[in-house]
Amino acid sequence: MTRVIIDPLNRIEGHLSIDLEVEQGRVVQSRTRGDMFRGFENLLKGRNPVDANMITQRICGVCPISHGITSSKALESAFGIEPTIKGTIIRNLVLAANFIQSHVVHFYQLSLMDYMDVTAVLDYRGKDATLLNLKGWVEKDIQKKKDRPDSLTAASPFLPRYEGEGLYVSDASLNLRFLSNYLKALEIRMKTHRMVALFGGKVPHAASLLPGGVSQKVTDDNLKEYQSMLKEVKSFIEEEYLVDTAELMKAFPEYRNMGAFNDFLAFGVFEKNGIANDNLFGGGALYGMNRFEKVAYNEITEHLKYARFEDGDPQHPSKGRTVPRPEKEDAYSWAKAPRYRGKPMEVGPVARLMIAYHQNNQAVKPAIDRFLAMSGMTVDSLKSTVGRHATRAIEASILADAIPEWIEAIPMGEPSRNEYMLPDHAEGAGLAEAPRGALGHWIRIRGGVIDSYQLVVPTTWNVSPRDNQGVAGVIEQALEGIPVKDPENPIEPARVVRSFDPCLACAIHTIQGGKEISEFRIS
Ligand code: NFE
Ligand code: MG
């Protein structure tokens, strides 16, 4: 048996390590360890309930909009109010731009380096100024490392990397296409951030999201600017992002059967034309593409046996507690283990798209079918390591298509926000989706302040440790059985884990305070 530890797994959000036992070249056991303790659920206690809106966004810089909207929903449900239609559509515009931003950066900046060969640029003989620029820089940086072997890196962040025979794309033109789009994606990310800021007030943490709707005005100017950036973003998605993920699926056929999971959960998101309960992506629990049910929200629990928190029976989040126990025996992760009807469930773009496919959702299924026809893939292949990347591109294209309809439906003369009154005693739940999957916030208000605030976040579902029955989490199960050809260069598990787009900042959302580690003086 060989023990393979990837610690930390880089190019993800937050701190995660992967601990594998490998026998005869295959993973026989895996553990995902969330390695940091934070504390947001606890620091919300005793505060004005509306603070949750701003504080939960600070859990993460990648999906703050989802936290801002989901906490607004939790507060609305506690306050007994609804958001306005106009406010709901504006939230959709902000959230859709944030989804596209998150998906694009995940594929191009965080994942593609597992597949493309950046050194292919050294053989580039064409005239594209950006590629020539990149080539010059890579050459210079590699030379610098040769001249000064003590320098830490050459051509970072592209190198160093896992090495081995045939690990990376060998086709020169595909490598150049990937590389050029890696650079273009940085521009697209900037544009999508601007789209968020137009109606969110700023990025990454939006100021305009409030219970009852939004505080931002809709004007001809901000609408036009948003629409013009959307046009550029949409052509990038259609001409580059969809094609690149299809090419990835073709180039790495072994990954079309690797890292799959079969049970899916989604809470639903993007109210069509701002109408409550009529979502572009519907919610549900789907088992193996055939058994489907509406989500029974009381069936969500969090297990604590292997998490670094005080033990207790599995609890629904409305009754959940977050009491850190760093030294607890057998505990190996700061992530709790969420379960639905006692089972681990994959959340995220694959879950949303598989549920839509199963429901024959006419706003979503045609886009999936178009991708399958263009790429020659099957729907099952989307539930895989390379397929997960494609589902994000498909989702981005669906959003880019849906946004103009929502804009048409904005009731311009109506208010963006309904008023609210702070209740003394109340409970509420906010249920929506973040780029990485189903997101829930549960609040209890006592004496006008927050008595309890619990979040169950997408990555917590996917990266969960074992539950009280010893059943492994989604990523842990997805890793079991996969090959690891070279334990010194464990690229297969890294690819599988990154395909889930984990964000440990979100998953643990709980700050270790008070301990001085070292002192720095900056002069
Ligand atoms: Ni920090 Fe997040 C998303 C949330 S986590 S990125 O998407 O909620 O899984
Ligand atoms: Mg939590």
Image (cartoon, rainbow, N blue to C red):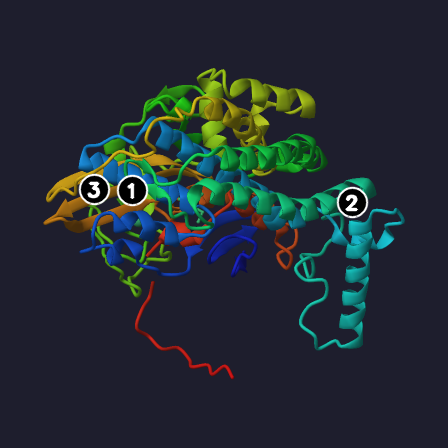
Residue type for callout 2: Leu
- Which of 487/495 is in front? 495
**Percent of width and height locating residue 256:** 62, 33
Mark number, residue 318: 3
Q: Which of the marked residues, 3 or 2, is nearer the chain's N terminus?
A: 2
Q: Is residue 282 visible?
A: no
Query: Label 1 belongs to which residue?
Result: 441
Mark 2 nearby-residue class (10 Å; few <14, some 14–19, many ≥20): some
Distance from Cα at disc 3 to Cα at disc 2: 50 Å
**Percent of width and height locating residue 257:** 59, 33
- Which of 416/14 is in front? 416
Residue type for callout 3: Ser
Q: Is residue 113 visible?
A: yes
Ligand 1 is in which quadrant of the figure? top left
Which quarter of the rendered picture does the N terminus lie within? bottom right
Query: Label 2 belongs to which residue?
Result: 176
Left or right placement of residue 30 versus residue 108 in this view: left
Residue type for callout 1: His
**Percent of width and height locating residue 334:** 35, 56
| Position above or below: 191 against 45 | above
Judging from the image, what secondary structure is the residue with disc 3 in? helix
Q: Are marks 1 and 2 in contact (CB under 8 Å)?
A: no
